[in-house]
């Protein structure tokens, strides 16, 4: 069964999302906390980790690492394509959440 592997990938992606958000909070002054935005971004990072671990199909430890790295890879790709310094700088009005 791949369920433990998928869960580990989701956890790896979630960890990456939390670290990225915390890094953003400490990198800029006067950054407010928006709970819906935070949970949406962490959940999406978890989904990316889950998909990455599904594609690799290793053991749980490997899936955790791949889940974390998958989010890192997508964030770097996003920064290159959009020429932005941060994944958190984009406007999320399209998602329906106000960024403070």
Image (spheres, helix red, strand yellow):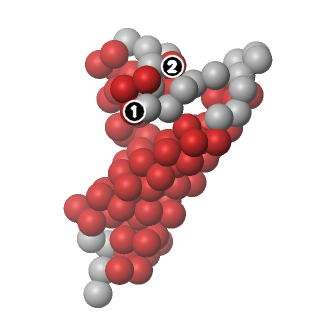
In what quadrant of the picture does the N terminus appear? bottom left
Instruction: Using the image, determine if residue 32 lies above or below residue 41.
Output: above
Q: Who comes first in sequence, dot 2 or dot 1?
A: 2
Local packing at callout 2 (Cα closer than 10 Å; few below 14, some 14-19, many 20+) is: few
Image quadrant where residue 9 sits: bottom left
At x 36% / y 51%, what residue is drawn?
48
Between 56 and 96, the one nearer to me in the picture: 96
At x 56% / y 48%, what residue is drawn?
39
State if disc 1 and disc 2 touch (CB < 8 Å): no
Name the disc covering residue 95, or none: 1
Q: How many numbered marks appear?
A: 2
In the rendered image, residue 25, in percent from the top left (x then y), is placed at 70, 29
Compared across the picture, whether 100 is left or right of 30 comes to left
Instruction: Using the image, determine if residue 69 lies above or below residue 31.
Output: below
In what quadrant of the picture does the C terminus appear? top right
CA–CA distance between discs 2 and 1? 14 Å
Compared across the picture, whether 42 is left or right of 29 comes to left
In the rendered image, residue 15, in percent from the top left (x then y), is placed at 57, 54
Q: Which residue is mark 2?
A: 89
Residue sticking out furthest to the bottom:
1
- Taking the image as drawn, is residue 93 in sight? yes
- Which of the two discs, 2 and 1, sits closer to the camera? 1
Instruction: Using the image, determine if residue 66 lies above or below residue 16.
Output: below
């Amino acid at each position: 069964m791949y369920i433990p592997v998928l869960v580990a990938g989701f956890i790896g992606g979630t960890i990456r999302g939390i670290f990225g958000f915390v890094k953003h909070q400490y990198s800029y002054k006067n950054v407010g906390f928006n709970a819906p935005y935070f949970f949406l971004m962490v959940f999406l990072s978890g989904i990316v980790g889950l998909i990455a671990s599904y594609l690799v199909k290793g053991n749980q430890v490997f899936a955790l690492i791949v889940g974390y790295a998958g989010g890192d890879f997508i964030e770097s790709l996003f920064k290159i394509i959009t020429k932005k310094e941060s994944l958190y700088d984009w406007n999320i009005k399209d998602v329906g959440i106000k960024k403070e």
